[in-house]
Image (cartoon, rainbow, N blue to C red):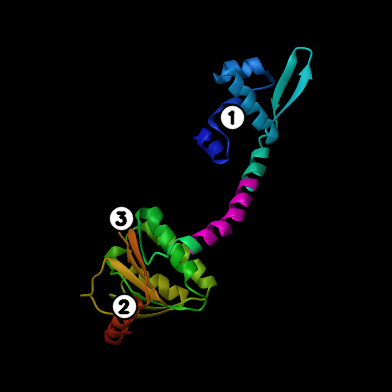
Amino acid sequence: MTDNKLNLLGLTRNEIRVYKSILKGAITGTQIKKYSAIANSQVYIALGTLITKGLVTYNKTSKGKRYYATDPLIIKKLAEEQSEKIQEVIPYLQQIQQHTIPLTDTAIYEGYAGFKTALYKLAEECPEKETINIIGFSNQAYKNKKLAALLRDVNKISAQKKHKFRMILDNKKNTFYSQRKEEKISNIRFMGRNFTSPAAIDIFQDSVYILLWDEHPYAIVIHNKNISIGFKMYFEFLWKMAKQ
């Protein structure tokens, strides 16, 4: 596990093995070769990189160089620098995407991680003070506690952006209703006990999010003006039928 984490900081396999050998104390190049089981030439290549990154230092004695590991807290600095580099390159990558790859009208996000991405995308993509129309799921679909916790986090973003919601649920016994009622940002109507749906449909602007709140959740995201208009008309039809 530790090797994988160090690898994320840009250290190669050889650099990690050399660094871990040196962490045990002052050590010579010969000892490093023995402990790390790496070829002599590769040991010194790794040492050069580790010294450049500030993870290793050395001093010269009559018997040659002895290598020391600097305070491992330097790794925190490396992580910060790595993060800064990532932030710098993102605008460049986005520019390439905008000029060379057409925007995808439809995307599918599967599993918890994918579903999480879709929900955060929804909250971030929706403009401030926008109203989101939701054809909600029935109560039996809202039993996954992990997804419930995720939704509470995403709703914090919506609260900051002052999103409003018009929502259609099955009935007031829906667990989701009590949460939304406390938040006081949703206008909710009910279709009655015969209304059942494992999925929710969130509609705003030209976007439609179809969200399946299941043990293995997934989301279908559609960006299309005409499709969005169709779902909005369907929502308004149900909204007029639903009761407060």
Residue 50 painted magenta: no
For this rendering, which residue is in front, 99 or 107? 99
Circle 1: is it few (<14), some (14-19), or many (20+) Cα within 10 Å? many
- Check contact, mark 2 vs mark 3: CB within 8 A: no
Residue segment shown in magenta: 81-98
**Where residue 23 appears, x then y in whole percent?**
64, 26
The label on residue 231 is 2
Q: Main secondary structure of the magenta part?
A: helix
State the separation of the CA atoms marked 2 and 3.
Answer: 26 Å
Determine the residue positioned at 60% across, 25% down: 18
User: Whole-Å distance between the Cαs marked 1 and 3?
Assistant: 41 Å
State the image coordinates of residue 199 (x, y, percent, origin top left). 29, 67
With 180 as the anchor, is 89 left or right in this view?
A: right
Considering the numbered disc 2 on the image, is that residue within a helix, a strand or a loop? helix
Mark 1, residue position:
15
Q: Amino acid at mark 1?
A: Glu
- Confirm whether residue 137 shows in the render: yes
| Residue receiving disc 3 | 215
